[in-house]
Image: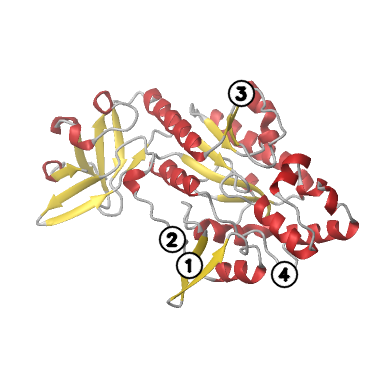
């Protein structure tokens, strides 16, 4: 499958089999382009209003609302990147095979559990090459520019529009922050456009749409991630938060104790690195982002139901800046609903300052 982006009015194509080459990976990192993805917001698995149209003075404006959840019940979604949001071991295998001339496959990783355990790569020279590659210091390859799973991108956009507090917590070293931030942008994944490199321990709770890399060496990553998440959870609970924390990670072993106790929910995407691992108690092992999407929509419905407020509130987005819409919950239910099926008396539009609701009669749904 070809990967394309525009640069100076031309289109440069890379296949999944040569994206690991430094010349190709670095070309993407040096560009400002975003991987072309045709994501129709109306097709996203959003547990709420998908689209509406505002008509006034011969002007028709479509907007895609974002639900505003009560922070007390807002789900917190912590998302891993490598081999969760995008495949990474695939690119690493290609890179090491290219540099050493000794081929290894994904089946080898399934059989032996890790690239470091593959028998044909058990030499000091290849170990040194792997060290250089995984530190992104090899002159010929860069396996850290990875194409995200299309369904992962769609689900993350849905999570954003559902109003969840989501964040990216990766085991990649802090030295990889700029590269990883650019790869998130290139893949068109939702994120905070103003995010800065910061140690996650500096934030008492996660910041929405932020990327957090690890300042520790690889052997300490699990302890670091555990410390970050348990501290966030403690601080959220102390502030009166009653929501659910969901960790999406292919190898959530750093949180085993919290998962088994039910303090956090874990969704593990089945892949190369957990192929031989038995799921923990309470760990949900899934095969696709379709399953993750369905589960997050369920979590969203629980958050809406738990909120004692009678109305659901939506931001009308940049098309109608400063405008909001509210819908009676007993009419819409906690999940997806069709705007056109609602009686006019059951919803209203209003500005941020709480003034006139005059837009109501001029809105229709798609």
Gap between marks 3 and 1 measured at Cα: 41 Å
Residue 145 lies left or right of residue 57; in this view the side is right
Distance CA(mark 4)–CA(mark 3): 43 Å
Measured as percent of width and height from the top left, residue 21 is found at 66, 67
Quadrant of the image containing the C terminus: top left
The residue where tag 1 is placed is: 5
Residue with the mark numbered 4 = 140
Q: Are marks 2 and 3 in contact (CB under 8 Å)?
A: no
Q: Earlier in the sequence, mark 2 or mark 3?
A: 2
Instruction: Name the front one of labels 3 and 1.
Output: 1
Pinpoint residue 132: horizontal percent, then vertical percent: 78, 62
Q: Name the quadrant containing residue 79.
A: top right
Marks 3 and 1 in Cβ contact (< 8 Å): no
Q: Nearer the viewer, mark 2 or mark 3?
A: 2
Horizontal and vertical percent position of residue 54: 18, 49
> Judging from the image, what secondary structure is the residue with disc 2 in?
loop
- Could you tell me if the residues under marks 4 and 2 are in contact, i.e. CB atoms within 8 Å? no
Label 3 or label 1, whichever comes before in sequence order = 1
Residue holding disc 2: 36
Q: Is residue 11 above or below residue 177?
A: below
The quadrant holding residue 163 is top left
Where does label 3 land, which residue? 282
Residue 147 coordinates in the image, percent (x, y): 55, 56
Q: Earlier in the sequence, mark 4 or mark 2?
A: 2
Image height check: is 255 above or below 8?
above
How crowded pointer 1 is (Cα within 10 Å; few <14, some 14-19, many 20+) is rated as some
The earlier-in-sequence mark between 2 and 1 is 1
Q: Nearer the viewer, mark 4 or mark 3?
A: 4
- Marks 2 and 1 in Cβ contact (< 8 Å): yes
């Amino acid at each position: 499958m070809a990967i394309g982006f525009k640069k100076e009015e031309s289109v440069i194509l890379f296949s999944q089999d040569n994206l690991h080459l430094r010349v190709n990976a670095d070309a993407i990192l040096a560009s400002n382009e975003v991987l072309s993805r045709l994501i129709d917001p109306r097709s996203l698995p959003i547990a709420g209003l998908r689209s509406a149209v505002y008509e006034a003075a011969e002007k028709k404006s479509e907007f895609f609302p974002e639900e505003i959840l009560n922070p007390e019940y807002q789900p917190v979604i912590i998302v891993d990147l490598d081999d969760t949001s995008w495949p990474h071991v695939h690119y690493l295998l290609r890179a090491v095979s290219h540099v050493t001339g000794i081929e290894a496959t994904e089946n080898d990783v399934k059989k032996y559990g890790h690239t470091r355990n593959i028998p044909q790569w058990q030499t000091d020279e290849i170990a040194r090459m792997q060290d250089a590659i995984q530190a992104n210091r090899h002159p010929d390859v860069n396996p850290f520019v990875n194409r995200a799973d299309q369904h992962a991108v769609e689900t993350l956009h849905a999570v954003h529009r559902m109003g969840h507090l989501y964040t990216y917590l990766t085991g990649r070293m802090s030295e990889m922050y700029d590269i990883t931030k650019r790869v998130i942008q290139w893949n068109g994944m939702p994120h905070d456009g103003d995010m800065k490199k910061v140690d996650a321990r500096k934030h008492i709770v996660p910041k929405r749409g932020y990327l957090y890399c690890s300042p520790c060496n690889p052997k300490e990553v699990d302890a670091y991630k555990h410390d970050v998440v348990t501290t966030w959870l403690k601080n959220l609970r102390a502030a009166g938060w009653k929501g659910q924390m969901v960790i999406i990670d292919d190898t959530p072993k750093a949180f085993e104790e919290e998962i088994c106790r039910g303090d956090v929910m874990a969704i593990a995407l089945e892949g190369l690195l957990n192929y031989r691992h038995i799921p923990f108690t309470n760990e949900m092992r899934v095969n696709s982002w379709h399953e993750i999407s369905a589960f997050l929509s369920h979590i969203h419905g629980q958050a809406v139901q738990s909120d004692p407020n009678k109305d659901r509130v939506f931001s009308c987005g940049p098309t109608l800046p400063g405008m909001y819409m509210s819908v009676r919950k007993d009419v819409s239910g906690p999940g997806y609903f069709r705007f056109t099926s609602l009686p006019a008396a059951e919803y209203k539009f209003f500005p941020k300052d709480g003034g006139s609701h005059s837009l109501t009669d001029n809105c229709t749904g798609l």
